[in-house]
Amino acid sequence: MEHIRNFSIIAHIDHGKSTLADRIIQECGSVSEREMTTQMMDTMDIEQERGITIKAQSVRLDYVKDGKHYVLNLIDTPGHVDFSYEVSKSLASSDGALLIVDAAQGVEAQTIANVYLALDNDLELLPVINKIDLPAAEPERVAEEIESTIGIDATDALMVSAKSGMGIRELLDAIVDRIPPPSGHPDATTKAIIYDSWFDPYLGALALVRVFDGAIRKGQQVMLMSNKEQHQVLDLMYPHPLKRQKTPAIKSGEIGIVVLGLKEVSVVNVGDTITDAKNPATESVGEYEPAKPFVFAGIYPIDTDRFEELRDALDKLKLNDSSLSYEPETSVALGFGFRVGFLGMLHMEVIKERLEREFNLDLIATAPSVVYHVYLNDGSMVEVQNPSQLPDGTKIDRIEEPYVRATVITPTEYLGNIMNLLVSKRGIQEKMDYMNEERVLLEYALPMNEIVVDFYDTLKSISKGYASFDYEPTRFREGDLVKLDLKIAGDVVDALSVIVPRTSSLSRGRALVKNMKEIVPRQLFEVAIQASLGNKVIARETVKSMGKNVTAKCYGGDITRKRKLLEKQKAGKKRMKSIGKVQLPQEAFMSVLKMD
Amino acid sequence: MLLYLHIPFCDSKCHYCSFNSYVEKFHLKEHYMQSVHQQLLKDLERFHVTHGAIESLFIGGGTPSTVPPKLYEPFFKTLRPYLSTTAECTAEANPNSATSSWLAGMQQLGINRVSFGVQSFNNAKLKRLGRSHSRDDAIRAVTNAAALGIAHISLDLIYATAFDTPSLLQADLKQTFALPIDHVSAYALSIEAGTVFANRPEVAKEHLTQTRQLFSAIEQHGFKQYEISNFGISPSQHNLSYWRHLPYLGIGAGAVGCVNNIRYYPHRNIEAYIQSPCFNTRETLHDSEIKSERIFLGLRSIVGVSRHLLGAAEFQRAQLLVDAKKLTFHDNVFYNTDYLLSDEIALFIED
Ligand SMILES: Nc1nc2c(ncn2[C@@H]2O[C@H](COP(=O)(O)OP(=O)(O)OP(=O)(O)O)[C@@H](O)[C@H]2O)c(=O)[nH]1
Ligand SMILES: C[S@@+](CC[C@H](N)C(=O)[O-])C[C@H]1O[C@@H](n2cnc3c(N)ncnc32)[C@H](O)[C@@H]1O
Ligand code: SF4
Ligand SMILES: [Mg+2]
């Protein structure tokens, strides 16, 4: 066990975690020159395309220092706030963490958030300043910033370039020297935590575990402590993005993949403890909270006949993404679909894209909503995830909405802009710290519904990309909120309703119909677009009817050509949703939250 | 049954035109005319065409008036027994090459309808379109045809160009209706790949109010709009038959035929065509494709769309359009009231 090092790589988004993982894997000789690719740990297509990590990924590596063999278990984690759940899981099975900080960007919002997560787990933190090859790199300034804002000693911070490979050897040596080996009792009965699970088409449900006490052996009868179910261990492997290696046992302090031969992944819950069936441990390793969705949106097939296909697709995605939750719902406008809970907007985007690409579905996503606690006059409380389900105003005593603690780090020159933005989003300042002369850290209490759409983009654009942002949910507070409905051609389209603060309902209503007017293409008929509060119309726009759609030319007998042109137009229309006589493009449903 | 014959020669290439035609292959004329004759013999045979079965002949181009009547003789000689006694026989003609003697020669062969490519009577506009004739050439050619007693005369006009003004279009119409014609085709300028205008898409410019004014002005002269681009005292049988989806033979380089729901395409390239005039590539039309064609063709013309063509949901959507006064419905046929919307209506109705 003294020769094992379990660690996660954590950082703000894009500071170079996955690239550093590549260099470490390479330095350990774990892949051949030929097999080497970039961001190897980002195994999903969507991760490669977007250049971001979505799911934490583990790898077991061998390293030799001073003639001694070490096993390094590395977990690359995502930096994006939506996926911080992945970071928590990873840290719970690590004994230390590399805190990567970009030498040009310095400490950012998710750097701090992730440090807190690591400290919650009592982990040894190794500060690593990356991208020192960049001309704009200021490693000394960044080291100071780490000391002053995070309060950890950065005198021994490692200076690396994950791009060029500079400093990697020193980093590996430091990992061996400074990250503590695992503790645990090799001779005690089996006790391991499941920190990830997914479904493999050939092997069935797989559990990725960190063994604390004892060992898991092939053939062993094990028990899941949460439900006392017993299963036999069919196979064991060490994780690797390209080539997993089989092993007869995963021992105390190690990580590995357990094959239980189960067809259903839902039995294998992340956070659960695996123990020996005959001689079970008395206590579980500890529990962590299941991932909690923050935003909810309706997902509907454009073609209403494809509801079952959508269900299958969600079921399949769920096998590899336990944070996904959904239940069927119906909409007058959109038919049968699902209300899906997401960890955030990026998560929502990723899931929608995967559903469309991997399962060949055309989908409509409604504008995401947070969960409201609606207290009725009779004293009862209902949770509302879908604005169209908000009970009648006369029945409501009060509505409470979720708040977050938002952390923004910005260069001082954008401070004014950013404070204005936060105020316009109903933010309440809780903290303002100058990290140094150039940078400020702000903490605000913000209604979560204000950050769901647009906030991040606006923040980035008013700070030329320099401000960073992180949030964590805090508590519910009362808000003066109303439901804003949208009528298209005279009928309320339930999927387009939104909940907004009463004070901004008029401006939101106006912005909404104006926006919608831009999005709704001209049709055979004039289309009235109205925003209303209850029965009261507060804003109206009209999309004029179309004047012409035909090519007035001579085709002679070449009718096929004409037909093909029309088929093309038809394919475009197929991606729209018919609501009565009116056809709405997919983006109409998301656009209701756009402010301008 | 209809017959289309393509003549792929032009004196010059107009800036907008992508029809299959050559300006430097006049030496192939004789050869070419022999080849179309060969294809005619073959097609009459393979489709078992019976005497008197061909209701309409259309000689289009390119420019049919670049080929002297004499060279058409063998073709007509073979074809004559297959033409019905009432057949409409149209030849397209350009004002610069359709001389009196050419017109007379064609009339002799049986042509009873001439369609002149006039485009405009404004010399400046003609020049900018790359036409090689003047306003006077056009007037003379039409007058000559009428003097010969050719029964039906049509003019092609082009509108929706950046060169148009309301007064220009008015003057064009005034001159058009001063001539002894019974039909007008008015085409909106479209930008085609491979033409001079392909690099100048801004020359196509449509003002819908102008278009509607143009349509109603033409109709005021008793020329009924029977298709998006066609107006006449009596419709051209050839045109109407296309929109009714009747079978047609397609003869010549770049012609298209369609018989028994197989659309066929002889070689487009003139040399390849002369090499093997009876070769063609084929496309079998599926029921869904035929249906779709019948719907959009029916909607862009007085042909209309029979309810029997439509599924239940499609019928319902068509009914919606009747309620909204976009269509009318009598004797089980839906008729479009605004041809300018025909494609949109087709898209709206079809599943
Ligand atoms: N110049 C330079 N660029 C680097 C270095 N390390 C990473 N990058 C670049 O920084 C970008 C982000 O790198 P990633 O490794 O994907 O960052 P990450 O931290 O894994 O990002 P997330 O997983 O999305 O949080 C990529 O374009 C890398 O090529 C470095 O040392 N020097
Ligand atoms: C097949 S062309 C040949 C007619 C004949 N060669 C002539 O130009 O007089 C028939 C008609 O199509 C029209 N046409 C051709 N290309 C066009 C285009 N790009 N846009 C609009 N009309 C076009 C012209 O009005 C033309 O007269
Ligand atoms: S419009 Fe007529 S003359 Fe001009 S190029 Fe086309 S076919 Fe030839
Ligand atoms: Mg990454």
Image (tube, helix red, strand yellow):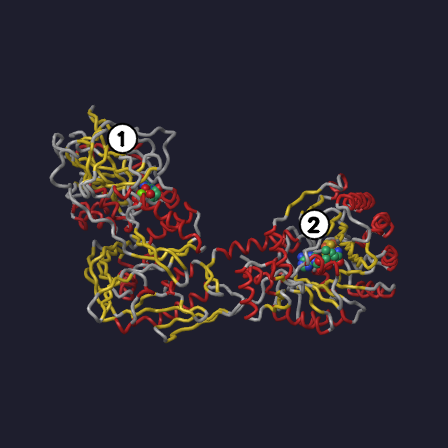
Which residue is depicted at the point 43% across and 50% down?
Answer: A361
Q: Quadrant of residue B117?
A: bottom right
The chain under label 1 reads A
**Callouts 2 and 1 close, C-beta under 8 Å:** no
Q: Amino acid at mark 2?
A: Cys
Classify mark 1 as within 8 Å of ligand 4 or not, answering yes or no.
no
Judged from the image, the quadrant occupied by ligand 3 is bottom right
The chain under label 2 reads B
Query: Where A473 sits versus A314, above or below?
Result: below
Give percent across and percent down for residue A551: 62, 60
Give percent across and percent down for residue A594: 37, 63
Judging depth in this view, the residue of A120 and B84 nearest the camera is: B84
Q: Residue furthest bottom?
A: A536
- Neighbour tally class for label 2: few under 14, some 14-19, many 20 plus, Cα within 10 Å: many
Image quadrant holding the C terminus of chain A, namely: bottom left
Distance between the alpha carbons at the discs numbered 2 and 1? 65 Å
**What residue sits right under mark 2 in the picture?**
B258
Is residue A500 visible in the rendered image? The answer is yes
**What residue sits right under mark 1 in the picture?**
A235
Q: Is residue B32 left or right of residue A311?
A: right
Which residue is depicted at the point 42% across and 61% down?
Answer: A588
Image quadrant holding the N terminus of chain A, namely: top left
Give percent across and percent down for residue A64: 23, 26
Q: Amino acid at mark 1?
A: Asp
Q: What SS does tag 2 mark?
A: strand
Query: Where A358 sits versus A506, above or below?
Result: above
